[in-house]
Amino acid sequence: MRWDPTDPAQRRARYALLSGMWSVFFVLFSWPYVALLLGALALYWGVSALRAKPRPSSPDAPSAPTAPTGRPQTTAAVGGLITASLALVLVASTFTVQLVYRDYYTCVGDALTHEAKQSCETLLPKELRGVLGAQNS
């Protein structure tokens, strides 16, 4: 049996993979704080799963057929590390954009009319007006 739910290293690897995937989803759905938490947890669980030593087999357990003795948690742990890293980079870039263009976001938040929101676009560089600017609808 490859998946042993009683093995803490394998559990952490699965947690890392699931947490990393959910952190990417939460970044895409604009919930950066939840994504930050799940990404940090996924990094922790992924690293601890990779650093864990293989569990010795129980003397009471029947001997398994000669199968390659590997670390089945490696793929899940690495997948969790990759997705968590991607999510953390996306969260960091979101926070950086909001910090750099704070004047624009403050102006849009304080605007009471659609025309006032549109006039805030002068605070953005011309290259980013189509990406970050207010929509013309």
Image (cartoon, rainbow, N blue to C red):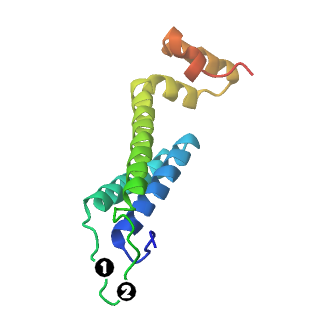
Residue 112, percent across and down? 64, 28
Quadrant of the snapshot with the C terminus = top right
Q: Secondary structure at mark 1?
A: loop
Q: Residue placed at 38% from the left, 49% from the top?
A: 81
User: Would residue 23 be found to the left or right of residue 13 on screen?
Assistant: right
Q: Which residue is mark 1?
A: 57
Q: Nearer the viewer, residue 104 or 68?
A: 68
Three-letter residue code for mark 2: Ala
Residue highlighted by disc 2 = 61
Q: Mark 1: few, some, or many residues within 10 Å (few <14, many ≥20)?
A: few
Q: How many marks?
A: 2
Whole-percent x, y for residue 97 in the image: 43, 28
Question: Is 81 left, or right, of 114 in this rendering?
Answer: left
**Residue 54, image quadrant:** bottom left
The image shows residue 130, relative to residue 87, as above or below, that is above
The residue type indicated by label 1 comes to Ser
Instruction: Name the residue located 56 percent from the left edge and 23 percent from the top edge.
Output: 132
Q: Are marks 1 and 2 in contact (CB under 8 Å)?
A: yes
Quarter occupied by residue 56:
bottom left
Residue 24 place in picture, x, y as percent: 51, 45
Mark 1 → mark 2, Cα distance in angstroms: 7 Å
Label 2 CA crowd tier, 10 Å (few <14, some 14–19, many 20+)? few
Residue 25 lies left or right of residue 103; in this view the side is right
Asked whether residue 131 is in view, the answer is yes
Q: Is residue 97 above or below residue 118?
A: below
- Label 2's element? loop
Q: Residue at x 41, y 68 (%)?
A: 11
Task: From the top left corner, tell me how far across and down residue 3 is, in percent.
Answer: 45, 70
